[in-house]
Amino acid sequence: MGPGCEGVPAAELKAATRKLAERLAQNPPAAIAGTKSLVYQAAGTPIKPQLDAEEAGIIGCMQTEEFRAAVKRFTSKSK
């Protein structure tokens, strides 16, 4: 599994789930909705059309004010 996919002890599962949900909730609603739509569509879509749809979704998100603001926050932290 990749980063962020570590297991947690059962006693810590509720807190870890809440922490992940709070982190995800900080994302723009349109990005969350687009991601959910792509995930649901992936099960019944051939790979090429799915990748095309994902590319279009990414490009669409990159053209939003939320994306530009997030990039600005990220790049200002690295200096």
Image (cartoon, rainbow, N blue to C red):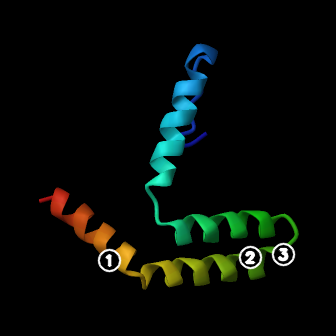
Q: Residues within 10 Å of mark 3 (few under 14, many from 20)?
A: few
| Most foreground residue, 49 or 18 | 18
Q: Residue furthest top?
A: 11
Label 1 to label 2: alpha-carbon separation: 25 Å
Residue at position x 57%, y 38% in the image: 5
Check contact, mark 2 vs mark 3: CB within 8 A.
Answer: yes
Disc 3 element = loop
| Labels 3 and 1: the sequence-earlier one | 3
Looking at the figure, which quarter contains the C terminus?
bottom left
> Where does the image place residue 66, in percent across and percent down from the top left?
38, 73
- Name the image quarter holding residue 37: bottom right
Residue picked out by circle 1:
68
Reading the image, the residue beneath label 2 is: 50
Count of number-bearing discs: 3
State which quarter of the image contains the N terminus.
top right
State the residue in front, 4 or 28. Answer: 28
Residue 35 in percent (x, y) is at: 63, 66
